[in-house]
Image (cartoon, rainbow, N blue to C red):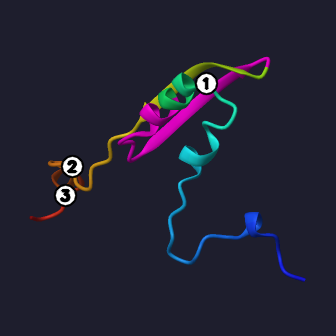
Amino acid sequence: MSAPENNERPKAGAMPNPVSTRLSHGMPQELADSVLTALKGLEFGSVEITVHHSRIVQIERHERIRFSHSPGRDEARGSAP
């Protein structure tokens, strides 16, 4: 027996966009846009959505900036350049 079409998984390597297809379903466009804005450009961090009585009441964005190398860090450890 084959699986129904709506349960198909994306092909390997395909990047589905569940945010744009699922968020706006039954949600006011303004809220969906606010969530997408919070996610836009976020490389490291999190977006927290607070819900009270089945309604979104707050969206928080926590962004982290990561550095691959901090100047002076090696010198503090006593490493030679």
**77 to 6, vertically: above or below:** above
The one nearer the camera, 58 or 29, is 29
Indicate the amino acid at tag 2: Ser
- Viewer-side label of 3, 1: 1
Which residues are the magenta region?
35-53
Cβ atoms at labels 2 and 1 below 8 Å apart:
no
Q: Was residue 1 drawn as part of the magenta stretch in this picture?
A: no
Q: Amino acid at mark 3?
A: Gly
Q: Residue furthest bottom?
A: 1
Between 8 and 72, the one lying in front of the other is 8
User: Mark 3 and mark 1: span between their CA atoms?
Assistant: 57 Å
**Up-down: is 45 above or below 79?**
above
**Mark 2, residue position:** 70
Answer above or below: position of 37 versus 45: above
| Residue marked by disc 3 | 78
Write the residue at 51% across / 70% down: 14
Task: Identify the element where label 1 is drawn.
Answer: loop
Q: Are marks 3 and 1 in contact (CB under 8 Å)?
A: no
At label 1, which amino acid type do we have? Pro
